[in-house]
Amino acid sequence: MKQQRPCPYGGYLICNNPLCEYRYATSEVLHLCSDVLEKIALGDTSQKIDLKFERYAVQRLINSINKVSQELSGIIDLAHELAIGICEHFDVLNRLQGGDFTATALEDSPIEVVKMLGHLINKQKDRFVEYINKIKQQNEEILHLYEQQNTILSSLGVAVIVTEENMTIEYANAEFEILTGYTKKEIEGKMKWTEFFATETVQEMMEYHNLREISPSLAPRQYESKLKDKNGKTKDVLLNVVMIPYTKKSITSIIDISERKRIQEQLIHSQKMESLGFLSGRVAHEFNNIFTGIIGFAGLLYTKIEEPSLKNFVEKIIDAGERARDLAKKLLVFSRKEEIEEIQEINLNKYLEDFSEFIKVIIGKDIELKLNLLEQEIFYKIDPTHLEVILMNLVTNARDAMPEGGELSIGLKEISIDIEYSFTHPLMKPGEYVLICVSDTGIGMDEQTKQKIFEPFFTTKPKGKGTGLGLPTVFGLVRQYEGQIHVYSELGKGATFKIYLPIKEKKIKEFNRDALKGTETILVVDDDDQTRGFICSFLKEYGYNVYEAKNGQEALEIFERNKEKIVLSLVDLVMPGIPGIEVMKQIKRIKPEAKVVIMSGYPLQLKDVITVEKTISSEEILFKIRNMIDRKE
Amino acid sequence: MVDRSYDFSGLKCFIPLLKLSAIYPEFKPGEIIEVVGDCPTFEKDIKAWCSKLGKTILNIEKIDRKVKITIKI
């Protein structure tokens, strides 16, 4: 009889022999199977029943459970593979969504669907990247186009605005900012175009605006107006308005014509003065002949008449005739028909100093005279009588403009008019001028008076006090020397008369030879052998040590090696290779305190650069060099 | 210090993985997250996920039938 032991799951165990198939009670096997199945159900596919039974049904159950575990393990592995694959793709999609286009999905999954999904994601990514690159390229093209348009708009030298239907300015270019003084930020979308124009012109412009809304052809496309800038200054402008097709927007280009108008007025005024001069000259000349006859014959008559009362009449005729002849003479001066008689070279400094004593007598004690003369002596070839007439007229006018006293200044200097200045002042030719400046602190003049002061017989003085021929005479004399006269005045702010007399031949300065000598070392850089040779030889003649360089590169090498010795470098402005200015910069980089003088073939003025013309005398070049070395410049 | 923690207890097999992938975009680099699960393959799944996505497992703790895994994103 086998010993019966209770089974933990119920029933009895029938055998203790581990090799006996009856060792496990059926119920225990079933329970074991149930436990294993439950674990498998939880996903633990490592479960396996490693028992052998002869009983077919039991063994089949165990086999089936093991098979389920094995099969399920495969399915779970597959599911994991699928899940991990999806996770990976998820990650790639997330990175792509975040803008990381370096993310690439793996296409090596053993699961076809995951592999396909990876392939699809990569293909989509490629398409997307391609699309983005295309958009980027288009954006770049648009940006480039925008930059180009912007450059065109800003380099036109013309202010341009785009305005909306409600008159708000949508766009303004840099030129408009310069013209108005407002910034783009202040203008665009905030200000209306009406805010930029003088009140008196806005109404007319509004009418044009309204007409343009109906039909662009109803309003003029181009017209003049007055623009008001941020400081309230009014500028004459020329507008050109074009409607943008299919919109209610318009593009307006604005050109500042204030300067052009001023020049035009100057030219018109000058032409008027020329015509007046011509006319008065002809009339005065004819009258002069007539007066000669009148005075001559009246003189003869005077000698023939005995009757005192008649003699008195003839005397009066002669007197009136002489006064008329004087008047005609003054008109001749104005018209520049009078001959220049006695040209002398005058030391203007000395002349003005001497003349100032006489001026003090004329202006009286209430007016203070200030002479602004430079140390440098200025010589000019002029008829001293003419200079006296010019100064006397200006001084007496100044005195009359300051009845309650004030200050009269007379200045003298030499100035150089460059091409740029002569563009804006077309009556002034480029060149060297002597400038005599007469200023007063008197009552000043309004614009209208200023326009007429040089016209013969125009006077603001009380009747009998002025002939109206003073300033025309000054004008005529200045023009006779091919000079110019400029007037600056405002009511209550005094007046300044600037007389520009062209220097035709410059007096050569006399230099003390010994003062020009030196023993310092100078580097001469010029590509032209002849010029370099000439400069070097006169430098050596005056005792200087010289290094020569025929181009910028060589100059820099020499300077680097001898930077302690070289006290000054004379560098040609235009050279093949490194230009003169760049050589100067590099020399200063090697030795910041280095002294450099730029030589040029023509007069030029450069900011922060000391220049010397090659055309001036060797003494003048030496003088400049000596001054530089001695730190006078 | 853990920045986020998720309990996937009761979820079978790869569902915790999919859930983790779904919330993954919320994670910021450097964050420490803690996941708990009781699925027998949970540990293996999380390890595989970390290895595939280059995340670092800081700690694995087994409490009864549950596994708590700390990950650095």
Image (tube, coloured by chain):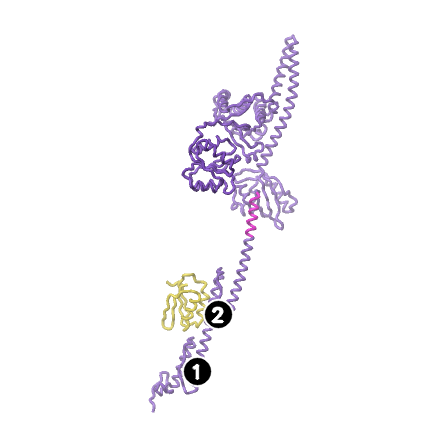
Chain colours: A purple, B yellow
A54 versus A454 height, above or below = below
- Vertical order, B25 against A233 (above or below): below
Which stretch appears magenta? A142-156
* x and y percentages locating residue A562 in the rendered image: 42, 39
Type of amino acid under label 1:
Asn
**Tag in front: 1 or 2:** 2
The image shows residue A588 at horizontal and vertical percentages of 44, 40
Horizontal side of residue B73 vs A504, given as left or right: left
Q: Which mark is residue A109?
A: 2
Residue A147 highlighted magenta (yes or no): yes
Q: Which residue is mark 1?
A: A63
Q: A234 or A265: which is nearer to us?
A: A265
Quarter of the image where the C terminus of chain A is located: top left
Whether residue B32 is visible, yes or no, is yes
Q: Specify the amino acid type for callout 2.
A: Ser
Identify the residue at image location x=55%, y=46%: A151
